[in-house]
Image: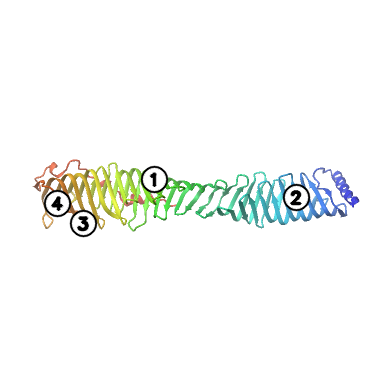
Amino acid sequence: MQKIFFSAILISVLSNHLNGQSGRLIRILNSDRATGSRNVSYLSGNVIFEHEGARMRCDSAVRYLDKNFIQTFGNIHLNQGDSISMTAKAMEYNGNTRMAKARGDVVLKDSEMTLHTQAIDFNRNTQTAYYTTSGTIINDENTLTSIFGMYHFGAKMFSFKKNVRLSNPRYRMESDTLQYFTQSRVAHFGGPTQIYSDSGYIYCENGRYNTITDEAMFNRNAIVRQKNIEMRGDSLYYNQREDYGKSFGNIQLTDSLEKFTIFGDMGEYSGLTDERMYVTGSPLFINFSEADTLFVLGDTIRTIRHRATDQREMFVYQNALLFRSDLQGKADSLHYSTLTSAFHLVGNPVLWNDTNQITGRVIVLTLKNNEPDSIFVYDNAFIVSIESDTFYNQIKGRDLEGNFIDKKLSQIFIKGNGQTVYYVKEDDGTFVGISRADCSNLLINFSENKVKEIKFITKPEARLIPLGKENDEDIRLKNLRLRFDEKPEVEIFKKLIRTL
């Protein structure tokens, strides 16, 4: 047995010397049995060979000296330094190309990962290993599978193709193309990718995901759905652990539960405690819960849903616009609360309802069953109603309270300092004069959004001015300002709807 062993060693040494290839030929370090010729050796029993820093063990092998090539069989173990090891049932190794081809229950390991597959080609020159017969990689708590894959040992990076799946206790990622770094545990994807978890769903066609921190940056058709919230944008950052997202460019934030979407150029979402949204860049709020869609526009829109009460508030800052088919509004800022179902318009506010214009220091509009129910105007309440192309009925007072029926103004109560300008008509519609009255408190009834009747709660100072005998003071109450030309049209809102 010792003679066989030393013969194998002698053959290796002489061959190295004769070929002038010291350090490049595969060296046989041990074999219990050796037969064959000088050029083709059949080795068996504890076969050990070495080549340029890699040591390999197997049950049996066939060595081709002139080709610097070896075929190995049974219980194969390959070790390259302390960092790379591989086991298989069969393997071919070429000493000239430094290429190892392992087959049968292959397990490849380094300090970061373990790869299981049926066939691996390991290129020691480029320090890459690739498979084409499906593989499974275990990296800490992540398990990755794919049809094709390549591992770069230097960069500690896998490149996956076709039916790629990354499984984690918290989520599952599916992609067609994926790069995964085993040290940083960051996944990069360059094709359609879906991430599923108990709390939601993510889709993107380009981006990266840190599986340690659960932070992600997506672009190209990015969608994040968490419970009832969906985020979209040209690019999107999301931290799944913190339930915090930030999107940029053509963004959409949608609440499927409350049935609204906010469009804009930049948006933030936070849902770990209370549910918060913040959108800038001509943000547009659309509530599509009812047939009459509500549009709200401003420079900044912020919403918060208080989890303790399950109530939502919306704040619109600067240049707020409100549109429904039955109501339109404008103000410096706007606030809405689902607790009170009320809109607060502050800062030079104005509200339009058909041919009526309502202004004051603060306007509060309440809804019931998603339809206008009541209105309150505090300080400098003023109503202008279009009677004709040139005639305007006017009602003015300190404060105002009113209600709606079937989306139309039904009744208005003026509290304090009431004044009116009202155009009087005959039954045939002919204008005959102007009723000018001052009264502390007034009650006005409307029919089809037109002034039908004015009731003076206390004795008024009133006069009827024949048409043609009026002067400017008779037909214009102090601080009258016609703002119908500011009333927004629906096209203003529709053109801001983003589509990805």
Camera-nearest label, 3 or 4 = 4
Check if mark 2's residue and mark 3's residue have beta carbons within 8 Å.
Answer: no
Q: Which of marks 4 and 2 is nearer the N terminus?
A: 2
Q: Name the residue under label 4.
A: 455
Give the label on residue 82, or none: none
Residue 269: tell me if it is visible.
yes
**Looking at the rendered structure, which numbered label has been put on residue 302?**
1
Determine contact: label 3, label 4, CB under 8 Å.
no
Which of the two labelled residues, at mark 1 and mark 2, occupies the earlier sequence position? 2
Q: How crowded is mark 3: few (under 14 residues within 10 Å), some or many (20 or more)?
A: some
Cα gap from disc 4 to disc 2, whole angstroms: 101 Å
* Residue that numbered label 2 is attached to: 78
Mark 3 / mark 4, whichever is N-terminal = 3
Residue 279 lies in quadrant: top left
Please report contact status of discs 1 and 3: CB closer than 8 Å, yes or no.
no
Q: Which amino acid does label 1 sit on?
A: Arg
Q: Could one spot residue 325 in this view of the protein? A: no
- What separation in Å lies between label 2 and label 3 (alpha carbons)? 90 Å
Residue beneath label 3, please? 448
Q: Please tell me which of labels 2 and 3 falls first in the chain.
A: 2
Q: How far apart are marks 3 and 4 (CA)?
A: 18 Å
The amino acid type, in three-letter code, at marker 3 is Glu
Classify residue 91 by image quadrant. bottom right
**CA–CA distance between discs 4 and 1?**
42 Å
The amino acid type of the residue labelled 4 equals Lys
Residue 66: x, y in percent? Answer: 83, 50
Lateral position of residue 94 relative to residue 456, left or right: right
Q: Residue at horizontal 62%, vertical 55%?
A: 145
